[in-house]
Amino acid sequence: MGSISFANALGIHPLALKLRDRRTELLASNLANVDTPHYKARDIDFRKVLKGVTDPDPALGLSLTHPAHIDIDHIPKEPPTLYRIPAQPSMDGNTVESEQEHVRFGENALQYEASLNFVGSDFAGLKTAIKGE
């Protein structure tokens, strides 16, 4: 009988929460600096970062030879942030487009909540398994 591993039980959801949290900070910073001259809007390519973790390039890292090995090479300490190219840049060099930032912020908040619900249901399943119900 194997032991319960939180990493196996929770899957990719804790990393997704971390990335969504960091993205929330970036989008909030963009919105806070909507009137700051020369401010450059930043964001995370969420799909690219998550794909790099779930489907790592074997040429870039070590291979795991045992199921108990923890693959820490592909978990980014700090996800790379990218500068956004605005559709219509402002005259003062600011690249924040307020309407687009609000849409992205709302979308990210909704996805963060969905990830929280996934983690919550995973914990409920673990609790049920531990109790043997």
Image (spheres, rainbow, N blue to C red):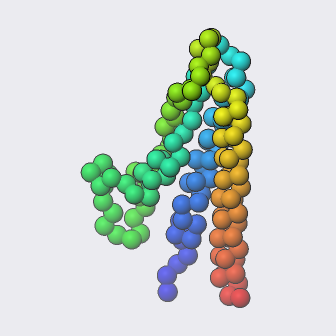
Picture residue at 72% right of the left edge, 44% below the top = 106
The quarter of the picture where residue 114 lies is bottom right
Picture residue at 59% right of the left edge, 57% below the top = 14
Q: Percent from the top left, x then y, of residue 111?
A: 66, 53
Q: Nearer the viewer, residue 85 or 49?
A: 85
Compared to residue 3, the image places residue 84 above or below, namely: above
Picture residue at 58% right of the left edge, 66% below the top = 10
From where the camera sits, is residue 38 visible? no
Q: Nearer the viewer, residue 130 or 45?
A: 45
Compared to residue 127, the image places residue 85 above or below, namely: above
Picture residue at 66% right of the left edge, 65% below the top = 118
Compared to residue 51, the image places residue 90 above or below, namely: above
- The outermost residue toward the top is 92
Query: On the picture, is 82 further left or further right than 121?
Result: left
Q: Nearer the viewer, residue 65 or 101?
A: 101
Compared to residue 131, the image places residue 23 above or below, namely: above
The quarter of the picture where residue 131 lies is bottom right
From where the camera sits, is residue 133 visible? yes
- The outermost residue toward the left is 59
**Quadrant for the C terminus in the image:** bottom right
